[in-house]
Image (cartoon, grey):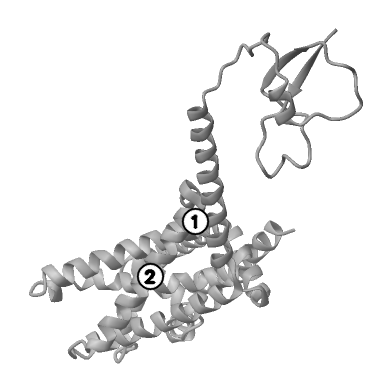
Amino acid sequence: RSRIYYVAAMSSAEAPKTQKCADKFFVEDNIEESDDEYNTDEMESRMPSKRIVSPISLKSEFITKATTVQEFSAEESTFRRIVSKILWHPITGNCLGLLTLFDAYLSCADIDRRAANLPEPAWLAISMDICLVAYTLEYVMWCFVRRFGVFRDKMLVVDLFIILCGFAEWVLSETMTRFLDNFNLLRMFRVARIIRLLKLFRRFSYLKELRKLLTMATTCMRTLCWSFIFCFVVMTIWAMLLVDLVQPLILKLHEDRGIFGDCEQCLRAASSVMDANLLLFKTVIAGDGWGTIAVPVIEAYPATAVIFVGSLLTLVFGVLNLIVAVVLDTFA
């Protein structure tokens, strides 16, 4: 009688455990049945001349190459996990937070220096360059961990914008030193680094209240934008009425009674639609000196109270409260 043995070719780590997997087939003739297990050496020593060859032929080079690729992928995956743990470790977050606060202080110091027309100290330039290098190193680590997923994270996109602005400023400061004073707008990009403070709210677990406020603010941002547009439209309607109906009365009061003689801005407060918008925003929205212009005009021409009081009631008790109601309804 003959038996077919299925011999496993396995790694040294799995060999002591099992010998059930195989990639070679052997046919052995006239072997007595026995309950003892055969090891690989015994089978090869007793291997007969007849052999059933597997239809799939795998060369040793292919196996070695595949194993090498798998080992490389495993090592790379392990290294990515280590880098990810480093990035999300609380100590790393705290260090980056302190670095961001220090960079914000450096930005404020640089703005004050330029406002006072003082020369840039060496320690300030070196410190800001170190912060830029640290931001770049962190972003490279995120790119290694998340690959193309960094472009789907809005905060990482902001980080990339900050880094590019920093390097652009550094290149211009090295190549265009003489003309940089006339190109101070680019230096304002340093202020954009302060935006990284918002990222700290997401990292620090003990800032969950601030993180919640930030999440709510970003959620209702579209609602707030449309609310501001609606407020501006309503305010513009009242501004048009001020220009057509109230501005001639203000000039007449100044000519006849000498009112607003010591207030030049009052005479041109409603001279155009945008000036009237500024007047309404200053007096109604901000509440700064509403009666400076309104009270003398209403006393001389009581009918103008419809415009002044109507704009106050519409904007303060109508539009602003409506904006609050819509924002609350967004989170309801």
Residue that extends furthest to the left in the rendered view of this protein: 178
Residue 169, position as x, y percentages in the image = 23, 68
Sooner in the amino-acid sequence: mark 2 or mark 1: 1
Q: Residue at x 71, y 28 (%)?
A: 8
- Number of numbered discs on residues: 2
Residue 147, position as x, y percentages in the image = 47, 49
Q: Which image quadrant for residue 218?
A: bottom right
Residue 246 appears in the rendering: no
SS assignment at label 2: helix
**Type of amino acid under label 1:** Lys
Q: Is residue 214 left or right of residue 32?
A: left
Q: Residue at x 34, y 88 (%)?
A: 259
The residue pinned by badge 2 equals: 192
112 is higher (above) or lower (below) than 188: below
Numbered label attached to residue 154? 1
Q: Which image quadrant for residue 315?
A: bottom right
Residue 207, position as x, y percentages in the image = 64, 76
Q: Residue at x 30, y 68 (%)?
A: 166
277 is higher (above) or lower (below) than 30: below
Residue 192 appears in the rendering: yes
10 Å neighbourhood of mark 1: few (<14), some, or many (≥20)?
few
Q: Residue at x 39, y 71 (%)?
A: 134
Q: Is residue 283 left or right of residue 161?
A: right
Residue 59, position as x, y percentages in the image = 52, 23
10 Å neighbourhood of mark 2: few (<14), some, or many (≥20)?
some
In the image, 76 versus 330, the foreground residue is 76
Q: Which image quadrant for residue 313?
A: bottom right
